[in-house]
Image (cartoon, rainbow, N blue to C red):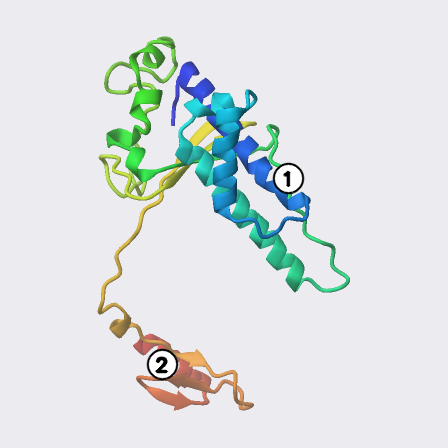
């Protein structure tokens, strides 16, 4: 993605707020509170935004960006807890670290309902007239066909699910700090054919017997010679 200067500043502010919310969950975990539910953090976030000056600026940040930061932090917390339960005595404890501004990758979640054509998400915030006119000398801004924050369409074999930029599932926006690149991770689902499983044929070496190279196939049978195994694979 190619955001202009104003869009970059706004997105960095959102990522900083998401990082602050993420660290709120991490700090709660470090206080030995390992089973705090998501509802508690959502209520705490709303309370801080309404009643404290330090968090009042978050009122202008899309709430979904902050809410997904809570979800990601809880998932990371639960994963650390599960790994510590499964670890052996000689292995070190897994630690849940705070998110920092110096992390190589900064990520926020973009909800599908806030995406429109050409991958323009949060149009009222990122695509208003003030922000679009704030950086006319943007190197990738080349007229109405390529407005700020556009995505490249000229590449062939890019593997995109559709050319119109229709996003049907929640996706991610990643900022690579060292390279200065903005990447939109497009999440989409694929449909599986109902009769696809009926056409799958498998021939595998049976690990439950002592005879060397004993194989079994549900369509061909079983055998013990390597030549038969090769014939079965050629047949499949």
Specify whether residue 173 is in view: no
Residue nearest the viewer, comparing 24 with 197: 24
Task: Point out the residue furthest to the right here.
Answer: 90
- For the residues labelled 1 and 2, the Cα–Cα distance comes to 61 Å
Residue appearing at x 60%, y 35% in the figure: 99
Residue nearest the viewer, comparing 60 with 202: 60
Residue position for label 1: 27
* Dot 2 crowding, Cα within 10 Å, few <14, some 14–19, many 20+: few
Q: Quadrant of residue 92?
A: bottom right
Element assignment for label 2: helix
Residue position for label 2: 231
Q: Is residue 39 left or right of residue 140?
A: right
Q: In which quadrant of the rendered image does the C terminus lie?
A: bottom left
Residue appearing at x 53%, y 47% in the figure: 74
Mark before the other along the chain sequence, 1 or 2? 1
**Which callout, 1 or 2, points to the residue nearer the camera?**
1
Residue appearing at x 26%, y 14% in the figure: 143
The percent coordinates of residue 56 (x first, y second) are 50, 22
Residue appearing at x 33%, y 14% in the figure: 132
Specify whether residue 35 is in view: yes
């Amino acid at each position: 993605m190619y955001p202009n200067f104003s869009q970059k500043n706004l997105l960095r502010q959102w990522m900083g707020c998401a990082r602050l919310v993420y660290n709120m969950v991490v700090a709660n975990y470090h206080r030995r509170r390992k089973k705090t539910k998501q509802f508690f953090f959502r209520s705490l976030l709303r309370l801080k935004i309404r009643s404290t000056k330090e968090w009042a600026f978050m009122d202008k940040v899309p709430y979904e960006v902050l809410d997904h930061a809570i979800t990601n932090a809880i998932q990371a917390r639960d994963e650390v807890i599960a790994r510590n339960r499964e670890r052996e005595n000689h292995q070190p404890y897994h630690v849940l670290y705070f998110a920092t501004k110096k992390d190589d990758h900064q990520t926020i979640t973009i909800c599908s309902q806030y995406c429109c054509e050409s991958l323009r998400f949060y149009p009222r915030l990122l695509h208003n007239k003030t922000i679009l006119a704030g950086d006319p000398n943007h190197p990738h801004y080349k007229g109405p066909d390529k407005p700020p924050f556009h995505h490249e369409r000229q590449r062939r074999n890019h593997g995109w699910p559709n050319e119109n930029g229709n996003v049907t599932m929640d996706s991610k926006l990643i900022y690579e700090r060292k390279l200065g690149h903005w990447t939109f991770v497009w999440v989409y689902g694929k449909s599986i054919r109902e009769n696809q499983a009926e056409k799958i044929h498998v021939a595998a070496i049976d690990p439950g017997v002592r005879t060397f190279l004993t194989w079994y196939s549900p369509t061909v049978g079983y055998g013990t010679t390597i030549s038969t195994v090769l014939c079965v694979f050629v047949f499949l």
